[in-house]
Amino acid sequence: MIYRDFETFIKIKDDLSVDEQIHIKNEIKKYCDMYDMQTDEDGIGYYLESNQCGRGLEPGFKFYYKVGKYREYFSLFEYNSYFEHDINYHEGEMNLNITNQNVYVISDIHNDAGGFKELLKKISFSSDNLLIINGDIFDRGDEPADLYSEILKYPNIQVVQGNHDVWLAREILEKYDNQKVGQFIRYNSLPLLEERFVPTDLINLAKWIKEQPYYINLNLNGTRYQIAHAQTYKTPERMWDKSKLYMGDEHYEYFIRGMEENDDYISVIGHTATENRKIWVSPSGRTIRTDCGNGYKPYNYEGTLGAIRLNDMQEFYA
């Protein structure tokens, strides 16, 4: 069996001068030779093929890192790590058609069970409503167990995966289920959860995270929305790991294009705190940002927890 553990995709900008193009191509070739990288027939993909799983990971990453200093000269600069695929993100998109129901969106709660409960009261949340939590339930605050338990009380709460949630799932599965499921950044959630939950509960929590979609296509009374944690966009042809797009991974070009140039739906996202720590709607009305900086409060920075009712765009704050 042949493995490609780490692949980099590069397109050089068309508007570079001849001298610039020659220089950049020579630099890419230099690092290809240095790390034994091979090239796809289309000249876009760079990889090291091997019959030993994992052999191409380190040289592939080093190539990506070295060539990355020239990213300003590229119209495409992405990577695909097959070691990150086995996190098993829920591949099916979620499609919802809602008519006579209020729909609220909140994101980036970050372990704040108290603020979440307060916000539920502010919106008079009931069984007649739908609440979408658009990622980053966990990390930073000190109430992950209470928050998780509160969310599970409501069958009319739908969760979207956020990067912090996925990192927690990976950490749990590596520690308690012997699964190597990709990279993660360790925050404070797992030690706090371990004070309340036994290993079986923790594994079930991780599986619950993985079962959630990473974006929702919502048709609300004829208005179409796509709700994703970090950004939205029709997945570029060469981006196989779609979770990177929807959870945010430095794909700024797609962020801009997806939000404001796409007429198929209104984008609803969190992940990056708004400047004034309030719900933000772009002048075009194509983008709604819901991260009001609640995750910064544990670090003594300004932030709050906000929700928006999509039916009439009314805002609510804890």
Image (cartoon, rainbow, N blue to C red):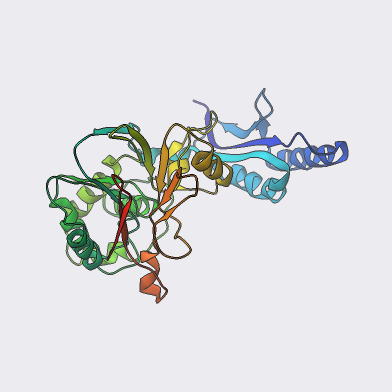
Is residue 215 something one can see in this rendering?
Answer: yes
Residue depicted at 28% across the width and 34% down the height:
221
Left or right: where does residue 260 sit relative to residue 213? right
Q: Above or below — where is 207 with respect to 220?
A: below
- At which x and y percent is residue 63? 65, 44
Residue, far top:
41
Q: Is residue 286 above or below residue 14?
A: below
Q: Nearer the viewer, residue 291 or 49?
A: 291
Q: Nearer the viewer, residue 136 or 280?
A: 280
Residue 259 drawn at (x, y percent): 49, 42
User: Visible in this render: residue 55?
Assistant: no
Tally the marks: 0
Q: Quadrant of residue 294?
A: bottom left
Q: Position of residue 307 (x, y in %)?
A: 30, 56
Task: Name the residue furthest bottom.
Answer: 300
Vertical placement of residue 286 versus 240, above or below: below
Q: Is residue 142 above or below residue 41?
A: below
Image location (x, y in percent) of residue 38: 67, 31
Could you say which is closer to the camera, residue 50 or residue 116? 116
**Residue at x 13%, y 45% (from the top left corner):** 128
In front here: 43 or 100?
A: 100
Q: Quadrant of the C terminus?
A: bottom left
